Image: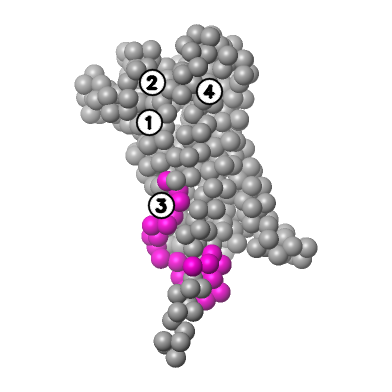
């Protein structure tokens, strides 16, 4: 009997929904979540690098761009620095966010079940919240040096010709090894809210949409996986952008001033004094395009890759 059923089970659990059907727990931690997260994050951030460059330059030099739109600001950059400037920081972006995505998605998925068991909550919202906080904080530490190099490449003309390794080496020579982690508190202010609203809302909205589909009985849940992924990812992108934008502004301001490093409270005070409350939302119009493109493509790609690797669709 064992010999007869073993091939069936080995084949069946290659399909996403069969973990639940066969009551076979998904291993924790599962490397497939880390692989899926790294691939989707590197791809989505890499292809949106030009938008990220425009957003970062608008935040760093608001007096130059005067809250112009995405296309107008991009045109100013091209006229001033050439078309290649829109690909500034591509290397740090792809490598940094590939590592960050692997950690963020992998840790979040790995921590959900332990927190569900620990908190014994009837709702997954609070356990997922704690899982996303820890995943976002850990990913911030890994991303900080690479994001520091990316922003210097985009905003500092003396860094324009530097590759990733040369840029990291130069920062270390100028400021010591601790300089690579300068702005880590600002990074956490951005990445933790970003992770909470991206990961948790994607999970919960996808689950809600599958519930609506199941109750309507118009379609089988398996037939609308792409539509559910896109809809949930788009909702997550709006929430994550709004929640994390003040931290994004603080991060750019922290990394931009290389002459006199300031602690986070001082940076926060400077932004408020110079621009008021609205200063914490400088460039949000451009970032809506950037984050919307990143998160929607990233989460849809994440769902696709992890299903290819035999994991269930998010919310299913």
Asked if marks 4 and 1 touch (Cβ < 8 Å), the reply is: no
Rate crowding at label 1 as few (under 14), some (14 to 19) or many (20 or more) other CA atoms within 10 Å. many
- 315 vs 190, left or right, is right
Does 20 appear above or below 205? below
The spot of residue 149 in percent (x, y) is: 35, 26
Cβ atoms under marks 3 and 2 closer than 8 Å: no
How crowded pointer 4 is (Cα within 10 Å; few <14, some 14-19, many 20+) is rated as many
Residue that mark 2 sits on: 153
Residue 140, placed above or below residue 119: above
Label 2 vs label 4: CA separation? 14 Å
Q: Indicate left or right for 261 with 308 as reference.
A: left
Residue 125: percent from the left, percent from the top?
Answer: 56, 55
Residues at marks 3 and 2, CA–CA distance in whole angstroms: 28 Å
Q: Is residue 2 magenta?
A: no
Q: Give the SS element for disc 2.
A: helix
Residues drawn in magenta: 14-38
User: x, y percentage for residue 152?
Assistant: 37, 20
Residue matched to label 3 = 34
Q: Which residue is mark 4?
A: 55
Q: Earlier in the sequence, mark 1 or mark 3?
A: 3
Instruction: Report, in whole angstroms, how far the alpha carbon at label 1 lies from the one at label 3.
Output: 19 Å
Which numbered circle lies on residue 254? none
Instruction: Nearest to the eye among marks 2 and 4: give it.
Output: 2
Which residue occupies the foreground of this view, 194 or 214?
A: 214
Work out whether residue 257 can be spotted: no
Q: Is residue 30 magenta?
A: yes
Q: Residue at x 54, y 53 (%)?
A: 304
Q: Residues within 10 Å of mark 2 (few under 14, many from 20)?
A: many
For the residues marked 4 and 3, what is the alpha-carbon distance in whole angstroms? 28 Å
Residue 34 in view (yes/no): yes
Which element carries disc 4, helix, strand or loop?
A: helix
| Mark 4 → mark 1, Cα distance in angstroms | 16 Å
């Amino acid at each position: 009997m064992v010999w007869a059923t073993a091939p069936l089970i080995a084949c069946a659990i290659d399909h996403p929904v069969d973990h639940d059907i066969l009551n076979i727990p998904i291993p924790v931690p599962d490397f497939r979540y880390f692989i899926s997260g790294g691939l989707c994050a590197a791809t989505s951030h890499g292809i949106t690098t030009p938008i990220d460059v425009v957003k970062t330059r608008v935040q760093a030099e608001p007096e130059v761009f005067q809250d112009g739109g995405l296309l107008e600001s991009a045109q100013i950059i091209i006229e001033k620095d050439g078309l290649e400037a829109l690909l500034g920081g591509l290397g740090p972006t792809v490598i940094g966010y590939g590592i960050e995505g692997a950690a963020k998605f992998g840790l979040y998925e790995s921590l959900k079940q332990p927190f569900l068991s620990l908190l014994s909550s009837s709702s997954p919202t609070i356990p997922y919240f704690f899982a996303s906080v820890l995943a976002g904080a850990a990913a911030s530490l890994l991303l900080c040096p690479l994001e520091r190099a990316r922003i210097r490449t985009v905003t500092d003309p003396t860094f324009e010709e530097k590759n990733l390794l040369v840029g990291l080496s130069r920062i270390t020579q100028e400021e010591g090894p601790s300089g690579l982690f300068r702005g880590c508190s600002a990074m956490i202010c951005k990445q933790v809210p970003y992770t909470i609203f991206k990961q948790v809302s994607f999970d919960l909205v996808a689950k809600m949409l599958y519930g609506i589909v199941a109750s309507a009985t118009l379609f089988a849940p398996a037939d609308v996986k792409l539509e559910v992924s896109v809809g949930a990812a788009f909702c997550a992108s709006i929430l994550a952008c709004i929640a994390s934008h003040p931290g994004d502004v603080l991060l750019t301001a922290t990394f931009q001033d290389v002459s006199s490093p300031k602690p986070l409270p001082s940076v926060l005070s400077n932004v408020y004094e110079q621009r008021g409350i609205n200063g914490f939302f400088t460039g949000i119009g451009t970032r809506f395009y950037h984050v919307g493109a990143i998160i929607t493509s990233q989460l849809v790609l994440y769902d696709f890759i992890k299903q290819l690797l035999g994991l269930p669709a998010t919310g299913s």
